[in-house]
Image (spheres, rainbow, N blue to C red):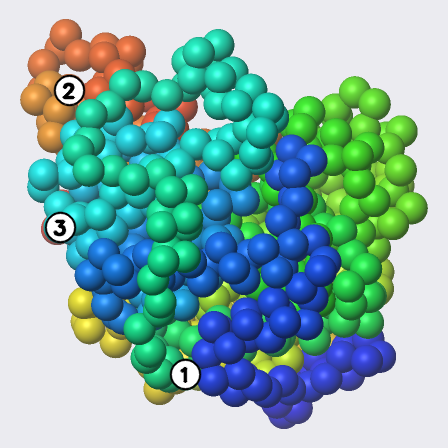
Amino acid sequence: MDQRPWLRKYPAGIPANIDAEAYCSLLEFAEECFKQFGKLKAFTLMGKSMTYKELDQKSRNFAAYLHSRGLNPGDKIALMMPNLLQYPVAIFGALRAGLVIVNTNPLYTPYEMEYQFNDSGVKAIVIAENFAANLEKVLPKTKIQIVITTTIGEFLGGIKGWFVDFAVKRIKKMVPKFTIENTISMGHAVSEGSRFSIKPFTPALDDVILLQYTGGTTGVSKGTMLTNRNLVGNLMQIKAIINPYLKVGQETTLSPLPMYHIFAFAVNVLAMMSIGANTVLIVNARDIGSVAKAFKDYKISLMTGVNTLFNALLHHPGFEKSDFSALRVSVGGAMAIQTAVAEKWKSVTGCPLCEGYGMTEASPVVSLNPLDGSGRLGTIGLPVPSTDVRIVADDGRICGPNEIGEIQVKGPQVMKGYYNKPDETANTIREGWLCTGDIGLMEEDGYFRIVDRKKDMILVSGFNVYPNEIEEVISKHPKVLEVAAIGVPDEKCGEAVKVFVVKKDKSLSESELIKYTREYLTGYKIPKFVEFRDSLPKTNVGKILRRELRG
């Protein structure tokens, strides 16, 4: 059997393989970008741009500041903010200091923050003030020694920065009061860093540089260990795919997805830097108006997003009148792209919407439909260069074309493992193959389809939600006897969380239960539907049968 039948479907100009060791580290890659594209705009937020040269200097200063505070290579630093100009400064400052980045969803509850910070052992954090009140609640229970705060307007400068912060704090009242001693602002840290130098260290290809938390294929959130090799490999894979369609130093790309999500981290930060692009950042992708406005303010040539975002834009008043003349690449990931949405996007913008597939454990990109429009709707496309994908039956047999089994992946982008979880790692990576837990098939010519996702995972607007985590929280409610969580179809989010609950106390109400979950779970994990039952279906050994609840 042809080992890589998909290569015959690659558009002209895309190589079968890339050099995953083109750089000895992600830091070496970044420094080349700073040097090559110095005068060009790197990132833009609310009309304010930062050049590659400015990013170079600010990140260098920030690294020196981190070292001056006693942090050493290998220490962990959490980054907890929306898309701001400060984010890339923090990313490359941390890399220059040899630190391990722990991206943290700023919408996390104190409960979720405490778990992630303690599991990863972070010693420092950069956090937007909007979320500092939650940090204050858990700080004494963590090993965090250094707290660096920032505001949405801090790097916008002048009157604009002042006005944005005034609006956020005073008018919208989006910054709850907090009292954390010995904090320093991001701007002050960058300024202070100019007085210090970076301690020398030698990065290696297999050094872990990013702990990206995910539910993995099962259970509680785990720190995915991504190395220099993983991230350099994946950015080179993405670069190889986009090279025929985008021109170096001439592109303006749009990043509505948050940088704390691995999709945006790899594609919108790293891969876009490789071509010297100016990436327009959106602070809050749920503000559809701000995403739509970017198409009026800039000549956007590439956009990434999730199905719900593309769909919302298509229904936003006036969006169809935007100028799409520069748009050449639209990529959807993190959740399935609906055929109706892809077809409408093409008719409105003139640009095909290409679905891809990835997972945090693969840094994240595994496959993508060709960007030239020759892709196949309803599939996850073709594996990216230097990537092997196979379908494996339950009995371990390698499946032939159109046979259904588990999707397994091998390539330079496959993670080193789960942090401090050797058993979970051994269950997920077998003989170099990443066992995704996703069920799919390969068509005869190498296109892949997902038939069924990880059996219990719920995908809400592109975010993984694991029933175990929901059930763990709800089961602690004193009025709950039993609980089971499943995903149900949702027009807006793809899927929504529904819980089935057996009461211990008859007075328990739906509103009381929902209010309780809000204390412990991020918004997208909160159940949208609650159904009370007298009992839950179980196996003969007492395991709850979620598949029966799904109907």
* SS assignment at label 1: loop
Q: Do residues under tags 3 and 1 come within 8 Å of each other at their CB atoms?
A: no
Residue 232, percent across and down?
52, 75
Residue found at x 82% / y 72%: 244
Quadrant including the C terminus = top left
Residue found at x 37% / y 21%: 175
Q: Is residue 149 left or right of residue 154?
A: left
Q: Do residues under tags 2 and 3 come within 8 Å of each other at their CB atoms?
A: no
Residue 433, percent across and down?
41, 80
Q: Residues within 10 Å of mark 1 (few under 14, many from 20)?
A: some
Pointer 3: what residue?
A: 143
Pointer 1: what residue?
A: 205
Outermost residue to the front: 195
* SS assignment at label 3: loop
Tell me the kind of residue under disc 3. Lys
* N-term mark: 2 or 3: 3
Q: Which mark is residue 366?
A: none
* SS assignment at label 2: strand
Tell me the kind of residue under disc 1. Leu
Q: Nearer the viewer, residue 195 or 373?
A: 195
Tell me the kind of residue under disc 2. Lys
Pointer 2: what residue?
A: 503
Q: Count how many numbered circles sit on residues in the image.
A: 3
Q: Is residue 77 left or right of residue 89?
A: left
* Residue 91 location, quadrant: bottom left
* Residue 387 location, quadrant: bottom right
In the image, is residue 414 above or below residue 137?
below
In front: label 2 or label 3: 3
